[in-house]
Image: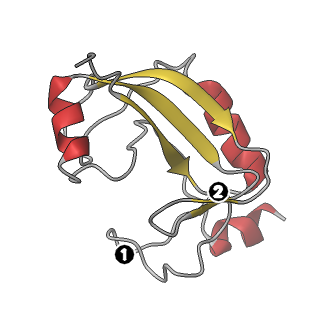
Amino acid sequence: MADEQRFVLGLAYQAGRDPRIAKGADGGRDFFTAEELEKACWSFLPGGGEIGLFHADGTVGHLTVTENSIYRGPDWEQPDGTVIKAGDWLIGGICDETAWRLVKEGKVTGFSPQGVARRITPRDVRSET
């Protein structure tokens, strides 16, 4: 049997609001416009391009990012029902043995791009105008 390639490709972040999600795990509901998301994507690899597991500290390095792009369309339905649309951010890479085992067991179902952002609330937007 040939060695497995251990490559995964998936949605890193959806552009715009997801109407299925009213509130995130942290109590808020953050989102990026397509334009903001494109800037984040383009700065990801020059900024180090690190992916963690399960949003946990100390888990960076289980995936070597080999692809990083904004999807340009058309809509692309995934086997789990997720639809990737134009403007969404995709990441692909090669998993180490630990991450690959977790992917095959169905325990890893998405990406955790490490980074920082400035949260703007509706009140912040009103004060800037």
The residue closer to the viewer here, 58 or 5, is 5
Q: Quadrant of the N terminus?
A: top left
Residue at 17% over, 24% down: 97
Q: Are discs 1 and 2 less than 8 Å apart at CB?
A: no
Point out residue 68 in the picture as x, y percentages from the top left corner. Answer: 59, 29
Q: Residues within 10 Å of mark 1 (few under 14, many from 20)?
A: few
Q: Which residue is mark 2?
A: 32
Point out residue 10 in the picture as x, y percentages from the top left corner. Answer: 49, 44
Point out residue 90 in the picture as x, y percentages from the top left corner. Answer: 58, 41
Q: Which residue is mark 1?
A: 27
- The amino acid type, in three-letter code, at marker 2 is Phe
In the rendered image, the residue lying farthest to the front is 1
4 displayed left or right of 127:
left
The residue closer to the viewer here, 46 or 100, is 100
Vertical position of residue 17 compared to residue 92: above or below: below
The residue closer to the viewer here, 57 or 106, is 106
Looking at the rendered structure, which numbered label has been put on residue 80?
A: none
Q: Secondary structure at mark 1?
A: loop
First of labels 1, 2 by sequence position: 1
Whether residue 45 is visible here, answered yes or no, is yes
Residue at 78% over, 50% down: 73
Q: Quadrant of the C terminus?
A: bottom right
Q: Nearer the viewer, mark 1 or mark 2?
A: 2
97 displayed left or right of 82:
left
Residue at 49% over, 78% down: 21
Q: How many marks?
A: 2
Point out residue 20 in the picture as x, y percentages from the top left corner. Answer: 52, 81
Whether residue 58 is visible here, answered yes or no, is no
- The amino acid type, in three-letter code, at marker 1 is Gly
28 displayed left or right of 52:
right
Residue at 23% over, 22% down: 96
